[in-house]
């Protein structure tokens, strides 16, 4: 393991992490409030959270909260009473989403129990004309050689990560900016060698909607071609980071595929049968919403990843959790920072936060020369990194 820089905090005004806590989180509260006809109790709790998350300190959860023991294990005693800006950024962001669910009664015993505050935004994405276009493109792909289909579906899953609702909230121009097609790191040949004839693929999903649909299409293709025997799809046990996928979002996505005209429906039916016969399993492990890096994963999850031919980890947040949420020098070897991971691991991610490893010196120099440091957070660049 190379020398380890300190974990990222959000205490520096003008930094990206600071803007997430100071601007993105209040904007999320406003959007959620507008999206539901909540009652006075939720409005009061949202007001309190709005005040607390920018000016207050981290508070405890109610005694009856079902996940109090999880949070105790995840360090709540150390951070309670401290400013949101002074604790590890990874920790404060996760806690914010948990407190938001508390405010809207998601974990309570009342009528709002289990109502996903982000569902309207996720559904709007599934119904968007862009989703129709992406699904229609599958018809043209259908007659192409299997390798070409596989490469296109892998890239669909990779670039699907641009569709992240939290990101778009604080960067309204993001969608309009052109993606840069050349990847900043591309280990896809190694990924294919791990996938070919694999027994088990673990895919750790990120966003619902326009990212989950291509993730599922990739899985459907790999199963249908017999490239992998089974797939395990890890989703979040509860709503998180605005658009992160839960089991309910998997169901919505598969149903969306089945309803679509053309080749998409066949993939949707294939996924439905794969879930029925166990060749596609969905898992919602509590650690998937933990405010900690994967290095701290519990033994049962470690055993699951250890048994996979490869674990594909999607998205920016999962990347931060995979390599540790630290300002690594960008040329720090990816293999070194992931050597603790219990099996082969691949990261598919568009770059939307400062954390980066595994760049060739010439790649970093070219990015800096062209963009200063904007390439780190703008969501226009992407990578496929693999540690076999
Ligand atoms: O994991 P994802 O959906 O690709 O991106 C998550 C994200 O939008 O949220 C975090 C900041 O709040 C960053 O990691 C990144 O900008």
Image (tube, rainbow, N blue to C red):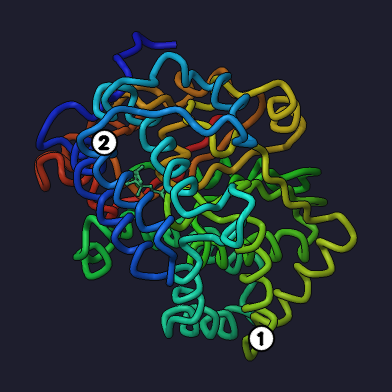
Residue found at x 49% / y 81%: 127
Classify 12 as above or below 169. above
Residue 62 or 202: which is nearer the viewer? 62
The location of residue 346, given as percent across then percent down, is 54, 39
Residue 346 appears left or right of 29: right
Q: CA distance from mark 2 to mark 1?
A: 39 Å
Residue 111 appears left or right of 1: right
Q: Which residue is mark 1?
A: 259
Residue found at x 67% / y 71%: 254
- Quarter of the image with the N terminus in it: top left
Classify 337 as above or below 386. above
Please identify the quarter of the rendering in which residue 39 is found: bottom left
Q: Secondary structure at mark 1?
A: helix
The location of residue 135, given as percent across then percent down, is 54, 80
Q: Which mark is residue 354?
A: 2
- Quarter of the image with the C terminus in it: top right
The location of residue 92, given as percent across then percent down, is 36, 32
The location of residue 383, given as percent across then percent down, is 40, 46
Residue 97 or 291: which is nearer the viewer? 97
Q: Earlier in the sequence, mark 2 or mark 1?
A: 1
Residue 349 or 387: which is nearer the viewer? 349
Farthest right residue in view? 277
Classify 351 as above or below 68. below
Please identify the quarter of the rendering in which residue 301 is found: top right
Other-residue count near label 2 (Cα within 10 Å), few / some / many at <14 / 14–19 / ≥20: many
Q: Secondary structure at mark 2?
A: loop
Other-residue count near label 1 (Cα within 10 Å), few / some / many at <14 / 14–19 / ≥20: some
Classify 69 as above or below 34. above
Residue found at x 38% / y 62%: 32
Residue 281 appears left or right of 152: right
Residue found at x 43% / y 41%: 99
């Amino acid at each position: 393991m190379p020398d380890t820089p300190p974990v990222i905090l959000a205490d520096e005004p003008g930094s990206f992490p600071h803007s997430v806590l100071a601007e993105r989180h209040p904007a999320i509260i406003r959007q959620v409030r507008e999206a539901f006809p909540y009652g006075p109790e939720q409005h009061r709790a949202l007001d309190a959270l709005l005040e607390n998350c920018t000016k207050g300190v981290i508070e405890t959860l109610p005694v009856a909260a079902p996940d109090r023991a999880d949070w105790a294990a995840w360090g709540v005693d150390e951070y309670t009473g401290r400013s949101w800006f002074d604790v590890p950024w990874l920790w404060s962001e996760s806690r914010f989403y948990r407190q938001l669910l508390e405010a809207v009664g998601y974990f309570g015993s009342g009528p709002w129990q289990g109502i996903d505050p982000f569902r309207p935004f996720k559904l709007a994405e599934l119904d968007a004309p862009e989703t129709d276009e992406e699904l229609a493109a599958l018809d043209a792909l259908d007659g192409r050689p299997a390798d070409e289909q596989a490469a296109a579906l892998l890239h669909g899953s990779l670039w699907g990560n641009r569709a992240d609702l939290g990101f778009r909230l604080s960067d309204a121009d993001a969608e309009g900016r052109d993606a840069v097609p050349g990847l900043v790191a591309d280990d896809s040949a190694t990924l294919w060698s791990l996938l070919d004839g694999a027994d088990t693929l673990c895919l750790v999903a990120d966003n619902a909607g326009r990212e989950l649909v291509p993730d599922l299409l990739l899985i459907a293709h790999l199963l249908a071609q017999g490239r992998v025997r089974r797939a395990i799809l890890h989703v979040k046990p509860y709503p998180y980071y605005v658009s992160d996928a839960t089991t309910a979002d998997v169901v919505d996505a598969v149903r969306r595929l089945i309803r679509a005209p053309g080749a998409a429906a066949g993939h949707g039916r294939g996924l439905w049968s794969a879930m029925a016969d166990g060749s596609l399993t969905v898992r919602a492990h509590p650690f998937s919403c933990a405010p900690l890096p994967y290095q701290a994963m519990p033994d049962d999850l470690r055993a699951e990843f250890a048994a996979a031919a490869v674990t594909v980890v999607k998205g920016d947040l999962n990347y931060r959790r995979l390599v540790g949420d630290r300002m690594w020098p960008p040329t720090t070897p990816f293999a070194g920072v992931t050597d603790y991971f219990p099996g082969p691991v691949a990261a598919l991610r568009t770059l939307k936060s400062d954390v980066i490893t595994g760049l060739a010196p010439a790649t970093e120099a070219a990015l800096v020369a062209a963009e200063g440091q904007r390439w780190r957070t703008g969501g226009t660049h992407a990578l496929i990194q693999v540690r076999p």
